[in-house]
Image: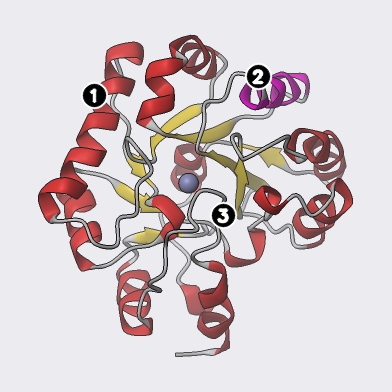
Amino acid sequence: MNIWSLLFLPFVCWHPFHHEVTAMPVEQQLHQYTQQGSIIKRVQTDHRWIALTFDDGPDPQETIEILDILKQYQAKATFFVVGEQVTKYPDIIRREVSEGHELANHTYSHTNFNHLSKEQVKQEIVKSENEILSITGRQTTLFRPPGGYYNDLIMMTAEQLGYSVILWTWYQDSKDWSKPGVHQIVKRVISNAHPGDIVLFHDRISGKSQTANALKVILPELQKQGYRFVTISQLMDSNQIRYQIGEN
Ligand SMILES: [Zn+2]
């Protein structure tokens, strides 16, 4: 256990639709999984590459606005979509794929995974996968549990289904869901930017989001600093060595 691990823990369960999540992962589990490299929070890379991730969509307003901005700056991102939303807005899913973004699994109903059985966890993942597959014809390989909450059962199930479990770099939680102000979101992301970071945003929150306006500042500023925005898979392919928490 080291200082970085301690700093990471309070960030794990904050998420706009995750108020129901009460349990924190135990330190031992966190250490174990990060040591094994089976949870990815950051990727070691020689490139000035960053992965932007957007959770909980698609949303007919927020996602469209975000896609327009990403297109303007030729930035690629990863969308951790919720199956129920995928069913409602298949055209947005098709647009995400056609514009070079990556789709990833964020469960079907975004329910609290804390007390689910193995079979229920499996159903949540598979049902979402089937929705995505029916629209895109492609399978996803990345999974992020609601709220970033995980335990042995969730990890084992996701891995047995062939997924890599992706969280986010502990200092790159934009906290956009809490609507802290565009300036705060911008500052949090830009002041902490490092190559290989995985940044957490949301493209569906309760009420009007500040995320799109923050991106209008973040994207040109980081590009000016030489950064390029890539999908999680592109970032992972840039270097096979994954960061462990103590090496952040
Ligand atoms: Zn979520």
Q: Say the numbered circle drawn on residue 45.
A: 3
Image quarter for residue 206? top right
Which residue appears farthest toward the left when viewing the image? 119
Image quarter for residue 65? top right
Q: Is residue 154 above or below residue 50?
A: below
Dominant SS in magenta: helix
| Marked residue nearer the N-terminal end (1 or 2) | 2
Q: Nearer the viewer, mark 3 or mark 1?
A: 1
Residue plotted at (32% across, 84% down)? 28
Which residue appears farthest toward the top when viewing the image? 91
Kind of element beneath mark 1 = helix
**Residue for badge 1:** 130
Residue plotted at (63% across, 58% down)? 173
Q: Report the number of numbered marks.
A: 3
Q: Is residue 82 above or below residue 5?
A: above
Residue range corresponding to the magenta coloring: 62-72
Determine if the magenta segment contains residue 71: yes
